Image (spheres, rainbow, N blue to C red):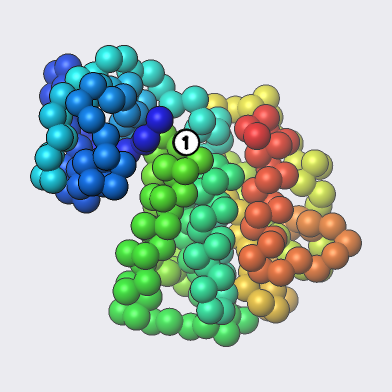
Amino acid sequence: MPRFFIGSENICGEEAFVTGADAVHIGRSLRMRLGDEITLCCEGREYSCKLLSISDTVCRCEIRSCAEGESEPDIALTLFQAVPKSDKLELIVQKAVELGACGICPVLTGRCVSRPDEKSFRKKLDRLNKIALEAAKQCGRSIVPTVSEIISFDECVKRLCEKDIPIICYEKGGKNLREINWGDRMANMSVGVLVGSEGGFEPSEAEKCISAGIIPVGLGSRILRCETAPIAALSIIMNLTGNM
């Protein structure tokens, strides 16, 4: 069933409204008809709806039922990804959303070859968030994870330390992810995962993380590419916490 994301302002009583490009998509690309059913997602809830009217500006829907989204993980996992070269970040964003991340935060570390300034990166940010939106639709998410502005390494350490379980995936090894105490699928437990770019982390960066209480983990005996490591880490964490 087609899935669209709307804001709370688009829900009024027993009706919901789809506007903008999504309204055009419903009528022109999907060629939907009155009475067809769609799923509308808003703030983690899923609304099963029937189309009452269709136009290029707004589609009016009757809300048939509402339920909490079943596809969202019990944990709130944020991926802190050191900025990689070329378009690798697009793949990382797509797969992180599919695997259940609630947010992706690009980070500038010492070994980042690609070092866009805030102004130039802001041009890419719209595309990255569109990729997150399309991935959320495709995999049945109930929320759209956000790709944030680039932050410094020091800011990243600060934000990681605010998480219940902060992790750095370190190429020189550390704990096995199975050795971490994940609790009993603690509701709303926050997890932060920091992954390096090509070349990993400076020793001083790893030391700063460890000194701050961030847990170093290894992802096996092989060195993974910077676009493979977050996929592996998120997959393992979601499996260990019962969220696959």
Residue 9, placed above or below residue 128: above
Q: Quadrant of residue 203?
A: bottom right
Q: Nearer the viewer, residue 189 or 10?
A: 10
Q: Nearer the viewer, residue 100 or 63?
A: 63
Q: Nearer the viewer, residue 75 or 159?
A: 75
Residue 45, placed above or below residue 56: above
Q: Residue at x 65, y 34 (%)?
A: 244
Q: Residue at x 73, y 58 (%)?
A: 216
Task: Give the amino acid at mark 1.
Answer: Gly
Residue 134 percent across, percent down from the top left:
41, 50
Residue hosting label 1? 140
Q: Residue at x 28, y 25 (%)?
A: 36
Residue 226 percent across, percent down from the top left:
66, 68
Q: Is residue 167 visible?
A: no
The quarter of the picture where the N terminus appears is top left
Left or right of 28 on screen, residue 228: right
Secondary element at image label 1:
loop
Residue 238, placed above or below residue 74: below
Left or right of 192 on screen, residue 124: left
Give the farthest residue toward the right: 221
Left or right of 155 on screen, residue 58: left
Q: Quadrant of residue 181?
A: top right
Residue 143 percent across, percent down from the top left:
40, 39
Residue 160, placed above or below residue 83: above
Q: Is residue 155 visible?
A: yes
